[in-house]
Image (cartoon, rainbow, N blue to C red):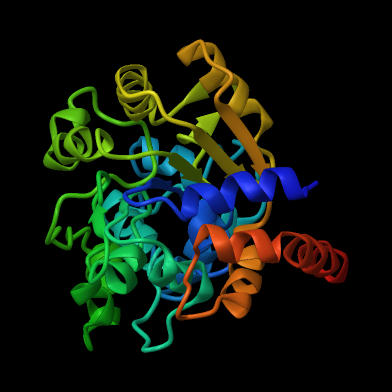
Amino acid sequence: MLTEKTLRRLLWAMAQPRTFYVLGAGASYGLIPVTKDLRRIIKAEYHSIGVYPVTRASWSPLFERVIGEVSPYEDDLEEILLTHMPHEALEFLAQRALWRPSSDVVPPQYAVFEFVPAPATLFNFNLDGLASLHCSHRHVVLEPHGRVDVPWLEHEDYRELLEGAVVYEVRVPHLTPKLLPGPEPEDITLGPSYTEAQRLIRRARAMIILGYSFGQRGTTFDDTQSFEFLAALLKNHHCPVLVISTTPAELTERLRDRLSTYDVHSIPLRWELFSGLLLASINPVEGISPHWCAKRLRSLVYAYERGLDAM
């Protein structure tokens, strides 16, 4: 439940200069499908081609994450044929499912960053590129996992490219490095985004982890390297950490244990709902300022609870 106390803490952090935001799938929820919904989208697009390889595809972490195990006793032909999907096609379809066509309309999930003090740091683990598209003119956007190859997905020959991947197992070249769903490589934190994050965190007065679970799978993380990297940063640079998600308690406790501090706080809210309400109440002149925050706490909590009841 969102309270005035937790909301006051969140708005304080958003009102600080150079706040360090860690963005996960929750930041794009309602715009981009989460991992558990990728299967349905990929399955439909794959079967739309109507041609299938004869042999089963080899196992891969990406297949395990987005398709999962198909029982050897499965009698649904469409399910069986998923196991014949070439890895090249699965990679291309995963990118397509994580892509949102360009638009001049900025969704509220990202439009709110227009009103936080600049420059904030957006350490964005999403592959959709929305933070760069909508926020890089004002803030520093880092993409440690890369982003989808938009030119291929917008290409007029997209269907031909997909057919080539499905029928002939042609790998559509990656235009930029990216990490599709699966475990992080051990050396990922040596990349330039992590080097820049080390520099920028030193100036942050708060960190907000927004809808990011570090790829949690049961009791383990796919993004173990990033979890340890951020934990090490916070050990060396003490600042309040706010964990925003619909169920933030478990990650909050993990971080408290890892950092040996109680200055890690759960903020239970749905960002796609709250960001719209926040955006609608902002005075463009004031932005998200301490003075503005003090006047809006009660009305925002009330509007948020009403919005939740209506969903």
Give residue 152's quadrant in the image: bottom left
Image vertical order of residue 220 relative to residue 212, above or below: above
Q: Quadrant of the C terminus?
A: bottom right
Residue 135 screen position, x and y as percent: 31, 68
> How many callouts does the rendering have?
0
The quadrant holding residue 140 is: bottom left
Query: For residue 166, what is the image quadrant?
Result: bottom left
**Can you say whether 67 is above or below 249 in the image?**
below
Left or right relative to 75: residue 161: left
The answer to whether residue 98 is left or right of residue 164 is right
Residue drawn at (40%, 47%) of the image: 21
Q: Who is closer to the viewer here, 53 or 148?
A: 148
Foreground pick, 170 / 38? 38
Give coordinates of residue 87: x percent, y percent.
30, 49
Q: Residue at x 46, y 38 (%)?
A: 64
Left or right: 246, with 112 as reference point? right
**In the rendered image, is residue 38 in sight?**
no
- Is residue 30 among the parts visible in the rendering? yes
Work out whether residue 67 or residue 52 is closer to the camera in this orientation and state it.
67
Q: Residue at x 46, y 26 (%)?
A: 221
* Residue plotted at (53% across, 57% down): 290
- How far from the left and from the top, in percent, is residue 7? 67, 50
Q: Residue 137: horizontal and vertical position, in percent?
A: 23, 72
